[in-house]
Image (cartoon, coloured by chain):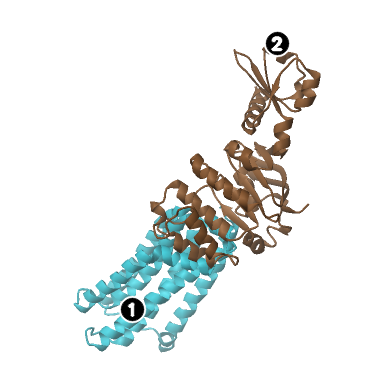
Chain colours: A brown, B cyan
């Protein structure tokens, strides 16, 4: 299998926070969702890929190239969308195109103009006059027009309305139709990732907590809703986290099928990525207690 | 790198227009005798100091540095482009002032000898290069906001010092004459100092930005 991105044993210390032994791989033709609560290490991971910060250890390969030794060649293949529009507010879309055409060797001006038309972005208005959604669309148009093979998005869809997000997700799905293309997208909006992601990596406190094919994860994990007495009877090794309230208990089950075979009297429901995250955090909190 | 220089010109075009207007206004003031013609040369140094600071301030405001470093231009391209942009603006200002001085002098609107005016332009260009050589690494290290205080102090010391020196020289009937060989070599020495410090500054800034966490 050809991987667009391979990260092995990545570590980075930032004061009291440590990104610890993170490994992930994004196969060509797929979308990997990177999820995690605030401060989990998603942006740190992305910054290490882009060499915006120095990693302490580990290796990162983009399209088979080392991201440090072949930095320029790697960056020619990466389209970047950060969590905010980083173009100066006095610039116009047409000027952004002129600037980036002189930075990226594979820049496609016709493609950029097409995206401006498709996204309804006025060429001659300053970016200051754009809405937040328009600024993000401009960032995405810029990233895609560089004809990258790997698209990296860091919280790019946060703060956008569902209509704009849907439009953007469609563009991502079109992008990965090419087998040599891949996307790494970090997002809090797990529902978006459930729509488009093929793989998911969940970072929790700097470590990989859960990782795998999205469909497989959603099929494997389950949500148990039961009374306290029932939960007390369950083997804790089968649980990945729990929430106990005065009305009842909920728990995250690691292997839904195995659990149902062992406890056929208990009902396990399908789970969402958001619930996997919540239960993992709650599980961590209850251990700390 | 060409794209980054292009970006600086697009972002700064309004400001560069204002500076052009300054030259015209101060040119008129020099012709009318409100200021000596050397004010135009001093403007070269002032603008050369303000342009990189404003440019980096705009970049900091837009968080452009992160994005630019993530493009194929990389960190080294960001630094190289900024130094080249500064040089281009400095050269353009110097040429503009030289042409303006030549026109005003040849039309008899300015009484100062043209050679003195052009020498002043050259000297101010050299001083500006040395000032930028000190400023740019600070800007890359600390950003525009934090460097502003340091640069203001620097500006006051340099220009205040020059004005004080001028006043002292006037009171004492002129500065002591340097030896003839030094007076002849001064332009070349200033040029070597200016270029040397600018090149050294470039390598220092590359080292600073290479290690900076963005």
Left or right placement of residue B98 versus residue A58 in this view: left
Q: Is residue B35 above or below residue B77?
A: below
Q: Position of residue A85 (x, y in %)?
A: 49, 51
Please name the residue that numbered disc 1 is placed on: B97
Left or right placement of residue B28 versus residue B58 in this view: left
Q: Position of residue B67 (x, y in %)?
A: 54, 56
Badge number at residue A22: none
Q: Residue furthest top?
A: A229
Q: Nearer the viewer, residue A211 or A40?
A: A211
Q: Is residue A20 above or below residue B34?
A: above
What is the number of callouts on the image? 2
Please name the residue that numbered disc 2 is placed on: A229
Disc 1 is placed on an element classified as: helix
Q: Nearer the viewer, mark 1 or mark 2?
A: 2
Q: Is residue A117 above or below residue A267?
A: below
Q: Is residue B143 above or below residue B23?
A: above
Q: Position of residue A222 (x, y in %)?
A: 70, 26
Disc 2 is placed on an element classified as: helix
Q: Residue at x 40, y 62 (%)?
A: B154
**Can residue B13 be seen here?**
yes
Give the position of the C terminus of chain A as an image quadrant. Answer: top right
Q: Residue at x 69, y 46 (%)?
A: A11
Q: Nearer the viewer, residue B52 or A283?
A: A283
CA gap between label 1 and label 2 equals: 88 Å
Left or right placement of residue A116 versus residue B47 in this view: right
Place residue A106 in its image quadrant. Answer: bottom right
Q: Residue at x 76, y 24 (%)?
A: A238
Q: Chain of mark 2?
A: A
**Can residue B176 be seen here?**
no
């Amino acid at each position: 299998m050809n991987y667009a991105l391979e990260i092995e044993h990545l570590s980075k210390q930032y004061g009291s926070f440590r990104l610890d032994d993170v490994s992930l791989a994004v196969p060509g033709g797929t979308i990997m969702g990177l999820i995690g609560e605030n401060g989990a290490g998603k942006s740190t991971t992305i910054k290490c890929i882009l060499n915006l910060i120095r990693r302490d250890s580990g290796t990162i390969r983009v399209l088979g190239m080392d991201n440090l030794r072949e930095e320029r060649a790697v960056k020619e293949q990466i389209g970047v969308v950060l969590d905010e529009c980083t173009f100066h507010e006095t610039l116009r879309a047409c000027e952004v195109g002129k600037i980036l055409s002189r930075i990226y060797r594979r820049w496609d001006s016709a493609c950029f103009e097409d995206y401006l038309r498709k996204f309804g972005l006025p060429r001659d208005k300053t970016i200051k006059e754009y809405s937040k959604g328009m600024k993000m669309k401009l960032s995405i148009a810029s990233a895609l027009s560089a004809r990258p093979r790997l698209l990296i998005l860091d919280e790019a869809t946060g703060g956008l309305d569902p209509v704009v997000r849907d439009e953007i997700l469609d563009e991502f799905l079109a992008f990965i139709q090419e087998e040599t293309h891949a996307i790494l997208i970090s997002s809090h909006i797990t529902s978006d990732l459930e729509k488009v992601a093929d793989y998911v990596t969940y970072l929790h406190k700097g470590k990989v907590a859960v990782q795998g094919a999205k469909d497989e994860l959603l099929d494997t994990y389950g949500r148990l809703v039961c009374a306290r007495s029932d939960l007390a009877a369950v083997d804790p090794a089968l649980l990945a986290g729990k929430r106990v309230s005065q009305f009842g208990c909920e728990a995250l089950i690691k292997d839904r099928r195995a659990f149902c075979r062992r406890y056929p009297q208990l009902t396990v429901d399908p789970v969402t990525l958001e619930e996997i995250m919540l239960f993992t955090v709650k599980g961590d909190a209850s251990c700390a207690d | 790198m060409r794209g980054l220089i292009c970006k600086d010109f697009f972002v700064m075009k309004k400001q560069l227009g204002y500076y052009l207007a300054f030259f015209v206004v101060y040119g008129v003031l020099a012709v009318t005798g409100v200021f000596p013609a050397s004010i135009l040369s001093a403007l070269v140094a002032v603008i050369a100091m303000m342009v990189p600071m404003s440019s980096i301030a705009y970049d900091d405001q837009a968080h452009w540095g992160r994005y630019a470093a993530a493009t194929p231009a990389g960190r080294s391209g960001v630094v190289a482009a900024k130094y080249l942009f500064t040089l281009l603006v400095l050269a353009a200002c110097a040429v503009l002032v030289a042409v303006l001085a030549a026109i005003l002098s040849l039309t008899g609107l300015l009484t100062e000898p043209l050679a003195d005016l052009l020498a002043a332009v050259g000297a101010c260009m050299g001083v500006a290069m040395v000032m930028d050589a000190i400023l740019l690494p600070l800007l890359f290290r600390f950003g525009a906001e934090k460097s502003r205080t340091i640069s203001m102090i620097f500006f006051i010391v340099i220009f205040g010092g020059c004005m004080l020196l001028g006043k002292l020289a006037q009171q004492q009937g002129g500065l002591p004459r340097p030896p003839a060989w030094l007076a002849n070599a001064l332009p070349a020495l200033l040029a070597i100092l200016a270029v040397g410090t600018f090149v050294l500054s470039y390598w220092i800034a590359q080292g600073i930005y290479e290690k900076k966490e963005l």
